[in-house]
Amino acid sequence: MNPIMNQDPAAPSSTPAPAPPPRAAAKPVALSVRDLRAGYAGGAAVLKGVSLDISERRVTAIIGPSGCGKSTLIRCLNRLHEALPGAFCDGQIMLGGRSVLDWDPVLLRREVGMVFQRPNPFPTMNIFDNVAAGLTLNGERDRAKIAERVESSLRRAALWDEVKDKLKSPGTGLSGGQQQRLCIARALAVEPRVLLMDEPCSALDPVATARIEELLLEIKETLTVVIVTHNMQQAARVSEYTAFMLSGELVEFGPTQGLFTKPADKRTEDYVTGRFG
Amino acid sequence: MGCAAPVIPPPTGRGRARVPGPRERAGDAFFRRALAVAASLILLVALALAWQLASASRQTWTSLGPAFLWRTGWNPVDDSFGALPFLYGTAVTSALAMLIALPLGVGSAIFLTELAPRRAAQALSFAVELLAAVPSVILGLMGVFLLVPAVRAVEPPLSRALGFLPLFRGAPYGVGLLSAGLILAVMILPYITAISREVLLTVPRPLKEGMHALGATRWEVVRGVCLPYARTGIAGAAFLALGRALGETMAVTMVIGNAPTISASLFSPAYTMSAVIANELAEAAGDAHLSALIAVGLTLFALTVVINGLARLLIYRLENRS
């Protein structure tokens, strides 16, 4: 029996034991996913029963070829997937002892932040307001407190020194890498427990990518990161755990180093050695 | 990294692209000139229209001068003319219509794009476009037989409840500014809804998801992302609707009561610029009457040009601010 399952306050003992996750995680579990199935009504399932435990304050990378369901997986974690027309999502996702399906999606998304594939700063807001957007949504009205949080978030996103003199200029005027760091600052400002990143560097050049990877190593001190990437080197560089997905199924999940050097599954080996995908 | 540039084979004698001959070049030049003529015709027609209106109304302008615009009497029998009641009627009915239709139209557009289930949204969008195609005389008939009696019934209680405002005092005729404003609102509603809907559909999904991911409610996403992103287009929709409200003739003529008076009450009969032209032009006996009617027409024309210019300016400002 998986020892983590017993520690996990989220796992109710009464539910019939779902398939245990492929590998045990060594840290307290932030998010536990059991038998997650998702897709679109009338179409083929995108996720065909995925189970994994995401460790707290660690970076978990999800790799796999295009269309394997990795983006859908993390979009289920903050319930953005089900907002799409015709989308469905079944299974169990536990966050802090509660099923995310019991959370109000609005409150859930304040605990589980997200950074998207393409930088999406709000075009009608300046840099300051972009970062403050989540705070004002939370009902924060104290200007001094907002200013303080905006600065600390921009510092954590390693963007403060570049924008501190132009906080009132539009966020869309920044370079692509800066825009993506702005979006990270925007997500961090709400102080989420979990940060989901959906291929955050795929629209960026190598220098901007390196900066984002650096800041990932810093922010994981305080929060859990789940990063979807099609770049295996990136997964190897930034993550402690890696999940390899193929056609909507979780093929292998475990410590990153082990997965890349001694993959247990033939398909994982073929993928990480570049034989397909 | 990066991929190699595609190799373009060097042109060889036989495989080379065919060079257009002199005939095709002449055809091209002809085509370009024909299009230029067609495009300049639009401008020419507008100028000719303005000139025609100005020259045909010269008698009024020379005898009364700009005072024609703020004189109140309109009595063709004594050759006494003043355009103010019509300006007032047009302004009040259009303002009333905008006041009602703009929030309703933008609200419906938000519902259709953000909230309604897809099937319902499609059916409703189709219905909205159908409503835009209803001829105004049909809406006028509906106004005469349904709206006017309803307004007549509603006016006394409205007057009792809100009678402390001069807007809601007076005899309940039914026909008047309120009915005209309501029928205009019905007429411009589909324009505002349909265009706002098109504009709201262009809001990129990643932006909306970005707002949702911060823990925004649907309303906060609409207010924080959708409306700011679409504001230029919505302003355009509003001005297009206003232009239509200012110029709308038939339905308004049928329900406004056609009395060249100025009253603070929304219940009182009034007259609009387009309505007076439509009603009196055929029966205008004297030159002075005809000239005065055309002067009203010129005023309406100038008003719509000014409104359109202001709309351009506003849209230009909004675009540059973001």
Image (cartoon, rainbow, N blue to C red):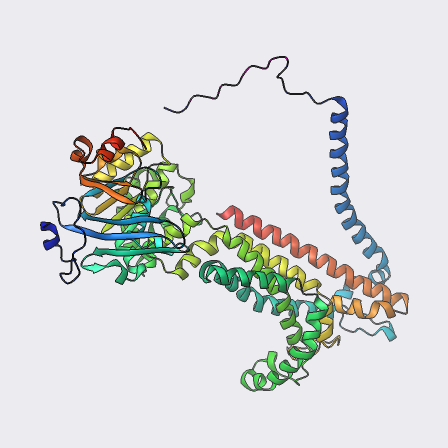
Please give the count of numbered marks on the rendered protein: 0
Residue at image position (25%, 55%) is A111
Say if B44 sits above or below B116 in the image.
above
- Let me know if residue B8 is in the magenta part: yes
State the image coordinates of residue B242 (x, y, percent, origin top left): 63, 61
Query: Residue B293 occupies which quadrant of the picture?
Result: bottom right
x and y, in percent, of residue B62 in the image = 84, 60
Q: Residue furthest top?
A: B13
Image quadrant where residue B262 sits:
bottom right
Left or right, residue B73 beside residue B311: right
Confirm whether residue A128 shows in the render: yes
In the image: residue A28, left or right of residue A116? left
Main secondary structure along the magenta-highlighted residues? loop
Q: Residue furthest right?
A: B286
Q: Residue at x 70, y 70 (%)?
A: B138
In this picture, is B252 found above or below A244? below
Compare residues A157 and B186 and report the one nearer the observer: B186
Asked whether A39 or B270 is in front, the reply is A39
In which quadrant is the N terminus of chain B drawn?
top left
Any magenta on residue B32? Answer: no
Report if residue A192 is visible in the image.
Answer: no
- Give the extent of the magenta segment: B4-13
In the rendered image, residue B16, in percent from the top left (x then y), is placed at: 62, 17
Q: Position of residue B253 (x, y in %)?
A: 74, 72
Left or right: where A4 falls relative to B292:
left
* Relative to B234, residue B172 above or below: below
Q: Residue at x 52, y 19 (%)?
A: B8
